[in-house]
Image: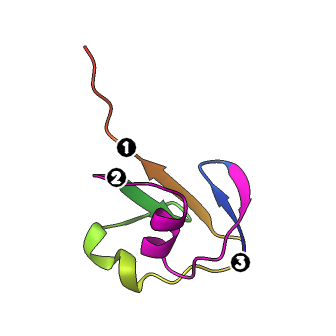
Amino acid sequence: MKIVLNGEPREVAAETLTALLDECGFSGRVATAVNEDFVPSSLRAGHRLNDGDRVEVLAPMQGG
């Protein structure tokens, strides 16, 4: 399936948001949005992806 992940077109096998995070190597605490709608971590496993979805994954940054 073709999606846009963090602004970059990607071809992925994942069918859910959780599977996408695993497939793309995201780990730890991240925030997710699909088509500009926030998806809480408790709903990611049941959130099915569709061809053309725009997914944003944000990780907290450390620094000062």
**Quadrant of the image containing the N terminus:** bottom right
| On screen, residue 48 above or below 33 | below
**C-alpha separation, residue under disc 3 versus residue under disc 2:** 22 Å
Q: Which mark is residue 59?
A: 1
* Range of magenta residues: 8-30
Compute the Cα span from label 2 to label 1. 5 Å
Q: Could you tell me residue 27's position as x and y percent?
A: 36, 54
Badge 2 density bin: few <14, some 14–19, many ≥20, Cα 10 Å? some
Residue 41 marker:
none
Could you tell me the amino acid type at mark 1?
Answer: Ala
Q: Residues within 10 Å of mark 3 (few under 14, many from 20)?
A: few
Q: Earlier in the sequence, mark 1 or mark 3?
A: 3
Q: Which residue: 46% across, 63% down?
A: 21
Dot 3 or dot 2, earlier in sequence: 2
SS for callout 2: loop
Disc sitting over residue 30 in the figure:
2
In magenta segment, residue 47: no
Residue 47 image point, x, y percent: 44, 81
> Is the residue 61 above or below the residue 4 in the image?
above
Is label 1 in a helix, a strand or a loop?
loop
Residue 35 as seen in the image, left or right of residue 46: right
Name the residue tied to disc 3: 51
| Up/down of 60 relative to 28, above or below | above
**Image quarter of residue 49:** bottom right
Q: Residue at x 57, y 82 (%)?
A: 15
What's the residue at 58%, 77% (across, down)?
A: 14
Q: Quadrant of residue 9?
A: bottom right
